[in-house]
């Protein structure tokens, strides 16, 4: 009987302690619920070169990239099975080393790798994991990272141009406004269909490239992703501001008709239509080797058309 009373007192005391520290069954359930509602982020080393760079850290536990990708995919599936929202971010070893150096952090710790992953997820390119294969995630993630890097670089170029010596207007802002005007006119005159636009222009350090996907019904304006639109206009603005030999290609798809490809070159702040022959040569020539490429079947190579843009204001 005394032993039974002691057991009761011990159980009662433990129950009070558990309630005080939130470790009752109900508290555990609540924490599990909160855990499911707390988003997770996974930093991904997409290629062998980045993976090899991380192997110099003693606390990095992997020695084979293929096995690493397999383990990451298993982790993503496990998190999804728990009903958790997971974001995949591109982990760049060079950026990580710079981050740790600037912050005074030890790069050879898992905690700081996790901290860096959270930082890049907040401001960098990411992909939400919804059960897709990792081999399908990687090209999308890389593409988004390239797009963001291009946009950031183009934005910095525009910001560094300063003001026009004649009128005092910000050259970068004026170029962006002009590029936005050209883009809107191009979309308005392109008509209905699914449109794929590419803008390219050389700079001192790189070849900038922007891609924009839009769709327009027979009635109403074109529908486009606002971030893609801003990126496209920014790259086009660089070509305008630097007066570099930029160009735009438009490919339009519509039901029961071949795809049509049109092209323009940028000159004096406006888009000048290319001839059908110039469009064919541009589309059917390898940009790196200069060798001819076979034309696609079911594609019509057409001259660019007048987009009816206002006359450009010149800045010096």
Image: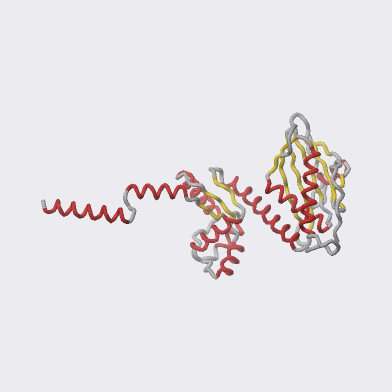
Q: Position of residue 59 (x, y in %)?
A: 49, 64
The quarter of the image holding the C terminus is: bottom right
Point out residue 58 in the picture as x, y percentages from the top left corner: 50, 66
Q: As drawn, which residue projects farthest toward the front? A: 167
Residue 220 appears in the rendering: yes
Which percent across, then down, holds residue 70?
52, 50
The image's colouring method is: secondary structure
Front residue of 244 and 76: 244
For residue 153, which quarter of the picture?
A: bottom right
Tell me if I can see residue 280 in this picture: no
The picture quadrant where one finds residue 155 is: bottom right
The front one of 25 and 149 is 25
Residue 75, compared with residue 242, is above or below; it is above
Is 124 placed left or right of 221 in the picture?
left
User: In screen coordinates, is 64 left or right of 215?
Assistant: left
Q: Looking at the picture, does residue 89 appear above or below residue 132?
A: below
Residue under the image location 68 percent in, 52 percent down: 147
User: Is residue 98 rendered to the left or right of residue 210?
Assistant: left
Residue at 86% x, 41% y is 305
């Amino acid at each position: 009987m005394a032993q039974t009373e002691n057991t009761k007192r011990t159980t009662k005391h433990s129950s009070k302690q558990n309630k005080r520290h939130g470790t009752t069954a109900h508290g555990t359930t609540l924490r599990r619920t909160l855990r499911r509602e707390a988003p997770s982020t996974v930093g991904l080393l997409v290629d062998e070169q980045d993976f090899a760079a991380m192997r110099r850290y003693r606390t990095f536990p992997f020695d084979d990239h293929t096995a690493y990708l397999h383990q990451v995919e298993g982790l993503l599936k496990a998190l999804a099975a728990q009903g958790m929202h997971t974001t995949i971010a591109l982990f760049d070893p060079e950026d990580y080393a710079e981050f740790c150096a600037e912050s005074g952090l030890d790069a050879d710790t898992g905690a700081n790798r996790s901290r860096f992953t959270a930082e890049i997820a907040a401001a960098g390119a990411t992909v939400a994991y919804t059960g897709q294969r990792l081999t399908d995630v990687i090209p999308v993630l890389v593409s988004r990272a390239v797009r963001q890097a291009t946009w950031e670089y183009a934005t910095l170029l525009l910001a560094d141009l300063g003001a026009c010596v004649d009128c005092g207007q910000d050259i970068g802002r004026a170029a962006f406004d002009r590029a936005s005007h050209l883009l809107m006119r191009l979309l308005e005159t392109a008509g209905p269909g699914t449109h794929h636009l590419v803008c390219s222009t050389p700079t001192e350090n790189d070849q900038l490239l922007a891609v924009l996907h839009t769709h327009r019904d027979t009635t109403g304006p074109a529908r486009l992703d606002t971030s893609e639109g801003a990126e496209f206009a920014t790259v086009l603005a660089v070509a305008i501001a630097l007066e570099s030999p930029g160009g735009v290609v438009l490919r339009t798809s519509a039901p029961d008709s071949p795809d049509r490809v049109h092209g323009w070159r940028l000159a004096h702040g406006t888009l000048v239509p290319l001839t059908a022959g110039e469009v064919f040569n541009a589309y059917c020539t390898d940009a790196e080797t200069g060798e001819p490429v076979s034309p696609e079947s079911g594609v019509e190579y057409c001259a660019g058309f007048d987009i009816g843009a206002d006359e450009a204001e010149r800045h010096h």
